[in-house]
Image (cartoon, rainbow, N blue to C red):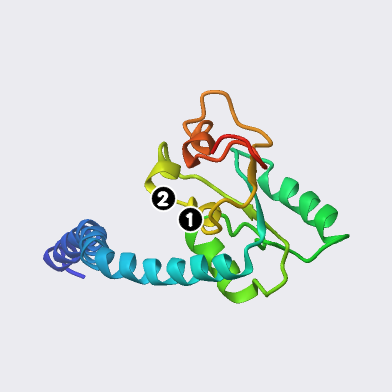
């Protein structure tokens, strides 16, 4: 390969390395409204299903320990009553909506939701807050097994607005 050809190839590769991420970012930006509408429909369907079944909700949040805590809670509750827990680490809004839409059945008494938060204030902006708000005044609580000191997500559970079950402040 001549020096001129290898120089052009190298230049082309360099441009590609820079341009491809920019093209992907622009495509994601242009598709964001479509994704938002799609998510809203999926979440609205899950909210309606939660309203009909009206299970009690236990939401588990924190920096770490959520999945283990959720699994222990699932074992305890399911020994006595019909219980649905979000599978694996389905801990974002769409994962929880998918769980409800695909697995929630009439007669389910408890929904144990592992709720991840991905930034400060997410609970106030929506995030997974729809899970608890779907049932009106039904009892619900948040368990926060552990959080890392200084973690920006440490207060996110308070932002959701649920503080205790049965008669406690919302």
Tell me: 91 left or right of 118: right
Q: What element carries label 1?
A: helix
- Residue at the image point whose x is 38% and y is 66% from the top: 40
Q: Residues within 10 Å of mark 1 (few under 14, many from 20)?
A: some
Q: Which residue lies furthest to the top in this view?
A: 149
Q: Nearer the viewer, residue 3 or 38?
A: 38
Q: Which residue is drawn at 59% across and 36% down?
A: 163
Q: Is residue 159 left or right of residue 167?
A: left
**Residue underneath mark 1:** 130
Quarter holding the C terminus is top right
Hey, which residue is sitting farthest left in the picture? 4
In this rendering, the answer to whether 30 lies above or below 74 is below
Q: Quadrant of the N terminus?
A: bottom left
| Location of residue 70 with respect to 10 vertically, above or below | above
Q: Which residue is drawn at 83% across and 56% down?
A: 75
Residue 104 badge: none
Residue at figure coordinates x 14%, y 65% from the top left: 8
Label 2, on which residue?
126
Q: Image quarter for residue 7?
A: bottom left
Residue 23 location in percent, x, y? 21, 64
Marks 2 and 1 sit apart, C-alpha to C-alpha, by 7 Å
Name the secondary structure under disc 2: loop
Do residues under tags 2 and 1 come within 8 Å of each other at their CB atoms? yes
């Amino acid at each position: 390969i001549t020096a001129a050809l290898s120089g052009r190839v190298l230049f082309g590769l360099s441009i590609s390395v820079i341009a491809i991420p920019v093209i992907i970012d622009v495509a994601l930006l242009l598709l964001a409204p479509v994704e938002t509408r799609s998510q809203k429909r999926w979440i609205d369907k899950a909210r309606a299903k939660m309203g009909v079944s009206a299970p009690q909700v236990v939401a588990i949040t924190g920096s770490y320990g959520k999945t283990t805590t959720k699994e222990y809670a699932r074992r305890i509750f399911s020994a006595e009553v019909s219980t649905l827990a979000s599978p694996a680490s389905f801990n974002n809004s769409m994962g929880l909506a998918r769980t409800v839409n695909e697995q929630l059945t009439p007669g389910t008494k408890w929904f144990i939701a592992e709720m991840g938060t991905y930034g400060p204030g997410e609970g106030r902006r929506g995030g997974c807050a729809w899970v608890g708000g779907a049932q009106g005044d039904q009892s619900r609580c948040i368990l926060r097994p552990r959080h890392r000191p200084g973690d920006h997500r440490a207060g996110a559970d308070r932002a959701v607005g649920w503080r205790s079950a049965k008669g406690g402040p919302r």
